[in-house]
Every structure is written in C-alpha cells, then in structure tokens.
Amino acid sequence: MGKTTTVINLAHGLARQGKTVLLVDLDPQGNVASSLNCPQGDGVYYLLTMGRSSPAEVQFVKAQVAATGREGVWYIPGGASTVRAQNDIANRNPPAPISHIREMLATFTGSGLHYIVIDTSPSIGGLQERALWAADLVVVPTNMDYLSNEGVSNVVRDLR
C-alpha cells in the first residue's frame, strides 16, 4: 500500500528542506532502486551480513552507498540478494542479534546524514523486526478500510 512511494517522497521532502537522507532498500523486490531509476545491488546484503568487527568491513559497507541523482538523497541498494541475507542472518548460530541493523546503521553517524529511511517488505519476519528495532519512528501506510485498520492495530500491538 504505497510504502516505497511514501519512503521516496519522505526522503525527497526532507532533502528539499536541506537535509541529507540515506534510503535503505530492505525490500527484496528492490523497488526503491527501480522507482528512482537506479540499479539494484548487493549493498543491503553486505549491510546485513557484515559485522562491525573491523574498520575495513565498516568502510566496505559504507562504500555500498550510491547516488540517486537527487540532491541530498543517497541509497543502499537492495534486491534479490536481500533474501539471501535474510536467510544468512536467520541461520547463524547464534542468530544475529535483533539490534544488528541498528548497530550497522550507527556506523554512519558523523557521515553528514540527517535521516536514514528504511523501506521494508510488507511481510513480517526477522528482517522487518530488526528494521523496526532500528527505527526511531515508524510510518505504516494503509488503506482506510476495516481490514487495513485491523492490520495497523496488529502492527502497533507488535511494536509495543
């Protein structure tokens, strides 16, 4: 229900106010990239599977950030490899902590970014839970009907 469109418009609106925004395309469909007419890629895969254990790994992840062609808006491309990353983090022993995405995105502190906006897939799973854990604010686009309202109520309940 318009998640990717909302994410892109939010990022563009913030950039028009002079803010610098990083879009993270956690949806395996890679719709952020295609909506911006930019290439999909493996940036999200590396964000999700690499650790903060060495400066080289952190720099490698930061090097995955790509320009969108819109002033003030950058993105970490996702795509088909995002599913592989989701499986990799789910099958780790021990599993990657729920705070993993937040910790990796924290490495961008001091990079001149004002906001990081994450686009997720509509399904709920380990990757989406980690994205919600990483978020300071959550926007849930929805239709204005009874079943959609019930769905939002469930999301709000799960966030608590």
Image (spheres, grey):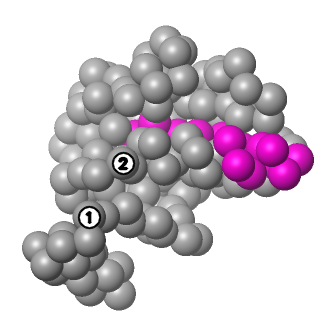
Quadrant, the C terminus: bottom left
10 Å crowding of disc 2: few (<14), some (14-19), many (20+) = few
Q: CA distance from mark 2 to mark 1?
A: 9 Å
Q: Amino acid at mark 2?
A: Gly
Q: Is residue 19 left or right of residue 127?
A: right
| Residue 99: mark in rendering | none
Q: Is residue 147 visible to us here?
A: yes
Please state the horizontal and vertical placement of residue 24, each as a whole percent of the image: 52, 40
Q: Secondary structure at mark 2?
A: loop
Q: Is residue 151 left or right of residue 10?
A: left
Name the residue rendered at 48%, 50% in the picture.
6
Residues rendered magenta in the picture: 12-26
Quarter of the image where one finds residue 67 = top right
Q: Earlier in the sequence, mark 2 or mark 1?
A: 2
Please state the horizontal and vertical placement of residue 18, each as a whole percent of the image: 88, 47
| Residue identifier under label 2 | 2
Q: Is residue 61 visible to us here?
A: no
